[in-house]
Amino acid sequence: MMRTDLAYEAHEGLAKKCEGVILEKHDLAHGELIRIEIIDEEAEKIVGKKIGKYISYETPSFKHLQDDARKEVIESLSSNLKSIVDINREKILVVGLGNRRVTADSLGPRTVDKIKVTRQYFKAYKKEYDEDYNELAVLVPGVMGVTGIETQDTIRGLIDRIKPTMIIAIDALASRNMNRLCSVIQITDAGIEPGSGIGNMQGSLNKESMGIKIAAIGVPTVVDTATIVSDSIDLMKKKLSHRIPVVDETLGLLGQLDDNEKMGFIKEVLNPRFSDTYVTPNEIDELIEILSDILAEIINRAVHPGY
Amino acid sequence: MMRTDLAYEAHEGLAKKCEGVILEKHDLAHGELIRIEIIDEEAEKIVGKKIGKYISYETPSFKHLQDDARKEVIESLSSNLKSIVDINREKILVVGLGNRRVTADSLGPRTVDKIKVTRQYFKAYKKEYDEDYNELAVLVPGVMGVTGIETQDTIRGLIDRIKPTMIIAIDALASRNMNRLCSVIQITDAGIEPGSGIGNMQGSLNKESMGIKIAAIGVPTVVDTATIVSDSIDLMKKKLSHRIPVVDETLGLLGQLDDNEKMGFIKEVLNPRFSDTYVTPNEIDELIEILSDILAEIINRAVHPGY
Amino acid sequence: MMRTDLAYEAHEGLAKKCEGVILEKHDLAHGELIRIEIIDEEAEKIVGKKIGKYISYETPSFKHLQDDARKEVIESLSSNLKSIVDINREKILVVGLGNRRVTADSLGPRTVDKIKVTRQYFKAYKKEYDEDYNELAVLVPGVMGVTGIETQDTIRGLIDRIKPTMIIAIDALASRNMNRLCSVIQITDAGIEPGSGIGNMQGSLNKESMGIKIAAIGVPTVVDTATIVSDSIDLMKKKLSHRIPVVDETLGLLGQLDDNEKMGFIKEVLNPRFSDTYVTPNEIDELIEILSDILAEIINRAVHPGY
Amino acid sequence: MMRTDLAYEAHEGLAKKCEGVILEKHDLAHGELIRIEIIDEEAEKIVGKKIGKYISYETPSFKHLQDDARKEVIESLSSNLKSIVDINREKILVVGLGNRRVTADSLGPRTVDKIKVTRQYFKAYKKEYDEDYNELAVLVPGVMGVTGIETQDTIRGLIDRIKPTMIIAIDALASRNMNRLCSVIQITDAGIEPGSGIGNMQGSLNKESMGIKIAAIGVPTVVDTATIVSDSIDLMKKKLSHRIPVVDETLGLLGQLDDNEKMGFIKEVLNPRFSDTYVTPNEIDELIEILSDILAEIINRAVHPGY
């Protein structure tokens, strides 16, 4: 199975329609809003995404958004974020997943830098309630390769101490398509599974594992290298078949390999030395800067009534 | 009471000798090693430092250490760190306190970047024991003004999940003397009290509050502004008294104010707007870079038998 | 002479009125706009600020600006920046002075990160002119203690290559008053003199030394430690004189010392080891983040007609 | 032509031997030292690398170097760096190329942070000569996408001001082989050509363009995505040919496409949106940290007699 963290990408890759999936597409003025819901365990297995709701906004590029396009993105996604996990009066923990020092993986930490943190004031003034702001704290747990600690342990330990009522997790995702790099924002109530994004998580981060409701928001910033190679071969097959008659047969045979066998094979070819490699655009730093601004705005609006 | 995180500085400031304090000084080739032990509650009250052992290495400057001086610092402090909390076969959590983005307060986080982290390998290979390395994880909890979370909650929550047998905490300290800025390293088993350093902690970080043994290591990187002013006045008194006969009387009277009254008075003069200000040298970035290298080397040697 | 980079602060400290200075104050809804012009060399000598125009906006705090206050700051200063050096069709070099790694000195570099850079597009598309954007490049020259290079050499060398028509320089300034820390923005056409801010410059950065027009924009982020001590003593004198009759006499005598003698004396007391120390609030990181946003917005609006 | 910045990789990819190339290989205890010299213009054209000397040290991994292996790398390369451009009494400008904020491209800037800078002391003490240290300054020019300025202009402008006698340039390189990522260090006197590494340079950086001698040192940290795809297809051909008889014919035909046509074709498939993408391992941050330490040590030893 090609690796993707986007539910609608996983769904569109299916050979045939799946019963337990509800799909809606809405054309907005500047982009497309796609809602997909995985409603039963069979659909979960077929699509490879957990039961839950997934809402994506896709636009050709977030890089040069005009004011009205930016407004559309932020308003539609902040209201969706609010409703998908029913944000009301909450004690919120915002978690920036990923590794701050690896550019393509720094979306979570860099978004967290721009979130309006308020819990310290609630504590200092012994407040229980504020008209304009929810109580909000942030955590950047780091990645196990740097800290030696499973991300879940840091988060779960903190939950036990400060007792938030919900989590919002931000993460860099993997897409299976270069065209979607840095051009989709996905929100879900289904949490985050191991091996997402640049592959930092060792276990699930969801309602079951954390004991409180969770919303996850992310943007694909990398494509797995094996996916790129596999895709390129498929596209070549299409493009070359009129020029070289036997192509179809050959690459077709490659195509007939079981997906896991094929990916394993490509990975063997690619990575004799590195456990994981990914493809990223060389303008990634600028894109992360822009995207972290937008995500922070979406979250700040969704969580603080008076923001 | 003038603010200092150095036990021997607190002690030397006392008007008269205190019973429950054991003090030893050792001249080494390149610096001075000072051991001070606070042995009872009365001494704790008089000196203003918790019961425990404090070991300091002081040298005119860590900035231009020759190889043999550097070796002396690292060897004497790593063996003292090892013995002060009896580091044996341990599961260690190294905590870098302070705010990474405020230069004078970044000593903890920047030291942690250079610590040899091993816990991920123990987990990946399901190891319980290694000849050369202890199991070690690191945490940079951040400061409450940024995260909204009391430092202790993040640490305590993590301890409950990963069950280390000891903590090593690294922190930027406050001195009451410009001459000691970035020129003393202090190790203690007494933990860290609220209002240390740049003032990030809200509660104690010690054996009682954490439930496991703790070693703290730090270097003064700031002097409280009120301390500087008070010191300057005292020194002026000394220097000017021969030139201006009434100085002694005037500044002497100022000196006779109760310490708390005096500091409160100076703080009122100084900080109408800011809750806290500190004095720091403008070469602080370079000094932190050098000191974090040395602290990391001390810790790596003390904790990993085969380092 | 007490050290300040703010012209109106230097002016208000004068014992008596100075002929060659024009001063205007305007109360705006959320702050005060002060224009001061040094018109001849005698005024230059008395005030200690170069011939030129200085415009300052002062407000109690930039930390919690409401939307309309923020708008006032940005609009009044961007139009003043535009007029003070007559920004028209230009090739602009924006220079972020200071040391990115020392928080209080990072205002210049961190503002530059948020400036809209366009020169690469002018070059790529061989454009000479754009309706909406001026050609703009940025430079962060670093400080001599880190690079080994005089800031002016890096800037001057680049000017000779890319031939801009004007410079906008951003720098962290020194104030002589804690109350003005991070609460004043100053714009000037007089350039930047050696020993400003945290003391990184070795020579002047002005129209004469660079050969093109220059606007400088800055915010005080530090107070020289010696200034703080001197101020505190003066304030004490005022506050204590009713309690201790001879205070006036003593501190008065100290006050009668020649300013240079007095500052030299205080510096001797303060800094046996460090060439320079400064006082900064411990929330400085957050303040720099906020101020760099505001400065970037002021500059972007002043330079790009279509921003 | 597949993209590589390593001369011996370019050479080994040639279909047949080339006259104007001198190649020597030396097995050392822990790695292999390869010297290649391009001696005439024909060789320059065939190999695709400028006339000059190229020295590479290759080892399976720099990640877990033992002390003696580390010593071998540093000693052999520092002495080669010294001799390749005849470092004697010099005024040196060390230039860290690349974008500090893009991890895979930050090798130059992060190495520069660890170089021993001395020029400020030569200037402060008006020294012309020092037994132990050469006069050395550093520059991090940034990349055109961020600064709007061609890297060469910043460097050339500075050379005109401070008149160094030589340049040492550090850059992240591109390899055409995943196996060589972060496992080769190359030194050359031929300078750096446009489109090297992550593709930041717009013109040449060499003796001709700068007017003084230049040594360049670099490590491959990325592979061009198109190269990876092309390689994967070649390897598949090899691996699959026994299983699928017509593979050879099909992929062989693809192989017969002219190299430029083939790469153009793959690029078309890959990057409809991004001008350039690259493949990098996800442990890149840790690798850059290790490599910048080693490069800085090589340079410090090569340039400062008393280091």
Image (cartoon, coloured by chain):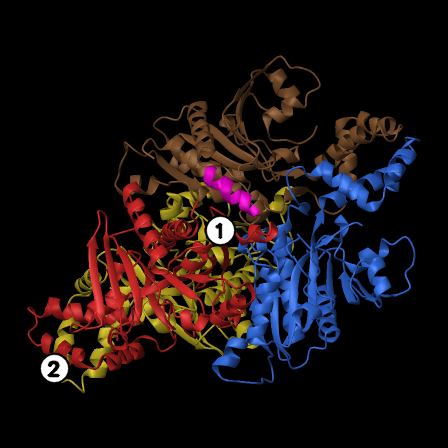
Chain colours: A brown, B yellow, C red, D blue
* Chain designation of label 1: B
Disc number at residue B246?
A: 2
* SS assignment for the magenta stretch, majority: helix
Q: Which-is-in-front pick, marks 2 and 1?
A: 2
Disc number at residue D302?
A: none
Please determine whether, in this image, residue A210 is positioned above or below residue B158.
above
User: Which sits in the foreground, C192 or D59?
Assistant: C192
Q: How many marks?
A: 2
> SS at mark 1?
strand
- Give the residue number, with chain letter if any, for mark 1: B166
- Residue at 68 percent across and 80 percent down: it is D88
* Chain designation of label 2: B
> Label 2, label 1: how many angstroms apart (C-alpha)?
56 Å
Please determine whether, in this image, residue C86 is positioned above or below residue A138.
below
Classify the position of the N terminus of chain A by image quarter. Answer: top right
> SS at mark 2?
loop
In the rendered image, which quarter is residue B302 located in? bottom right
Image spot of residue D155 (x, y percent): 59, 66
Which three-letter amino acid code belongs to the residue tagged 2?
Answer: Val
Image spot of residue D127 (x, y percent): 53, 85
In the rendered image, which quarter is residue B221 located in? bottom left
Asked whether residue A59 is in view, the answer is yes
Q: Is residue C236 magenta?
A: no
Segment tinted magenta in the rendering: A285-294
Classify the position of the C terminus of chain A by image quarter. Answer: top left
User: Which sits in the foreground, C307 or B210?
Assistant: C307
Query: Callout 1 environment at 10 Å: few (<14), some (14 to 19), or many (20+)?
Result: many
